[in-house]
Image (tube, grey):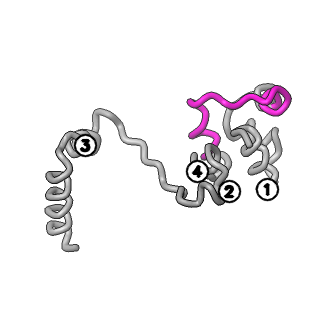
Amino acid sequence: MIISQRIYKIMEDKKISQIEFSRKTGISQSTISDWRRKGTNPSADKLMIICEALDCSVYDLLLDTKNKKHKEYKATETVVIDKNSRDYKIIEAYNKLELDNQKRLEGYLDALSGK
């Protein structure tokens, strides 16, 4: 099943009309119709907007989560962080550390937070 088919399936399951979906996402009805008619998929930059409108995860759109082959994948929350934020800089610094130093930092954070 391709992404656009999953979108239509979720819309059907949640009883969301194409008009309502178009209104929620800002994607034109003709574009949405093209997905079904031409068997095309939405562009990557629209996936998060679509997920918000359908109240689903990106995994739900990209993977057949009901398929046993993909059982190990679990829906996760997606966090968007501004590249200029302190949080982003901390994550970048963490990712640059060697694995053993990442573990040490995690232990230090656990100790500071009282875990």
Q: Name which of mark 4 and mark 1 comes first in the sequence.
A: 1
Q: CA distance from mark 4 to mark 1?
A: 15 Å
Query: x, y (%) of residue 8?
Result: 78, 44
Q: Which tag is nearer the camera, tag 4 or tag 3?
A: 3
| Residue farthest along the right direction in this orientation | 37
Query: What residue is disc 1 on?
Result: 13
| Snapshot quadrant of residue 91 | top left
Quadrant including the N terminus: top right
| Residue farthest along the bottom direction in this orientation | 115
Query: x, y (%) of residue 53?
Result: 66, 46
Q: CA distance from mark 1 to mark 3?
A: 39 Å
Residue at image location 57% in from the left, 46% down from the top: 58
Q: Regarding mark 4 in the picture, which secondary structure is present there?
A: loop
Amino acid on which the number 4 mark rests in the picture: Ser
Q: Which tag is nearer the camera, tag 4 or tag 2?
A: 2
Query: What residue is disc 4 on?
Result: 57
Residue 2 lies in the magenta-colored region: no
Quadrant including the C terminus: bottom left
Crowding near the residue tagged with mark 3, few <14, some 14–19, many ≥20 C-alpha atoms within 10 Å? few
Q: CA distance from mark 4 to mark 3?
A: 24 Å
Region rendered in magenta = 33-51
Circles 1, 2 touching at the beta carbon (< 8 Å)? no
Is residue 78 shown above or below 104? above
Q: Name which of mark 4 and mark 3 comes first in the sequence.
A: 4
Query: What residue is disc 3 on?
Result: 95
Dominant secondary structure of the residues highlighted in magenta in the image: helix
Q: CA distance from mark 1 to mark 2?
A: 17 Å
